[in-house]
Image: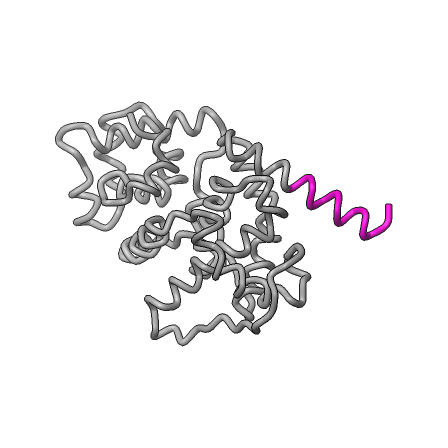
Amino acid sequence: MAAEEYDITKKSLDNDRAKEAKENASQREAFLADSKNHILRLTAKITGHVVTESDDEWSIALIATSEAIDSYESEKGNFWSYAAIVIKSRLTDMYRKQPDRNSEISVAPDAFEGNADENDSDLNIRLEIGDKIQAASFGVNNDLKDEIIALTTELKKYDIKMSELFDFSPKSYNTKGSCKKVVGAIFLPPPLVELLKKKKKLPIRDIIKRTDVSKKIIDRHRKYLMAVALILDGDYPNIREYVKDLES
């Protein structure tokens, strides 16, 4: 198969996977996991510098990609062109609220047309124009970006990076069930959230007294469990949708 034919086939496959991921949580998880390197390269292209999983840009880009899945429709063209616009918008918002970062996303004026991916030399051009039509055409949830930034700031107090949440999230059905039990135990009366906030760590001993989940599983997913508890206890209605399956 010629390189051009492969590229078209790959884009079409990703478009189909994005549409399926919109309706299926497990397919969304698999699609995001399989696309990790693509998202990293795409984010690096947008920001103009290397991005790793330890950077805030990665966590913003990952959640922005998931957000793009939620609002993607076939008429919006190639999924990654659309996702790139959402990612760039979210990163721009983050930089505006963190002026000390002195980070900029440079773009040039031109027309927004065609498909975008991490190998597209004109991606920044397309993104700038894409931003101008984003609000009217794509209906992106502008409240979510504020929640992401607020949660990122809160999690730093607990030495948790947003980028870690995907890695520490439960993958198997049984582990998800165990994590749901732990979250339920945290919110049993009296709730342990205030103790979590005071100690800045997961009160594992207290949780074990309330559930039959092993210490090994709790410790393995402790950062994810802490983040979920803070999301459920905080003012994050949009992000809460991503973890509602863990609510009792």
**Residue at the extreme front of the image, as rendered:** 136
Of the pair 202 and 116, the residue shown nearer to us = 116
Left of 137 or right of it: where is 221? left
Q: Residue 173 appears at what percent x and percent y? A: 47, 25
Q: Residue 210 appears at what percent x and percent y? A: 23, 26
Tell me, yes or no, whether the highlighted magenta stretch contains residue 11. yes
Q: Quadrant of the N terminus?
A: top right
Of the pair 215 and 47, the residue shown nearer to us = 47
Count every numbered label the image shows and give the total: 0
**Residue at the extreme left of the image, as rendered:** 190
Majority secondary structure in the magenta region: helix
Identify the residue at image location x=49%, y=29%.
172
What segment carries the magenta color? 1-14
Taking 204 as reference, is 140 above or below it?
below
Taking 187 as reference, is 31 above or below it?
below
Left of 68 or right of it: where is 11? right
Q: Quadrant of the C terminus?
A: top left
Left of 121 or right of it: where is 160? left
Identify the residue at image location x=29%, y=55%.
150
Tell me, yes or no, whether the highlighted magenta stretch contains residue 106. no
Q: Residue 118 appears at what percent x and percent y? A: 64, 59
Identify the residue at image location x=38%, y=27%.
178
Q: Residue 246 appears at what percent x and percent y? A: 34, 30
How did the renderer colour the structure?
one colour
Left of 121 or right of it: where is 167? left
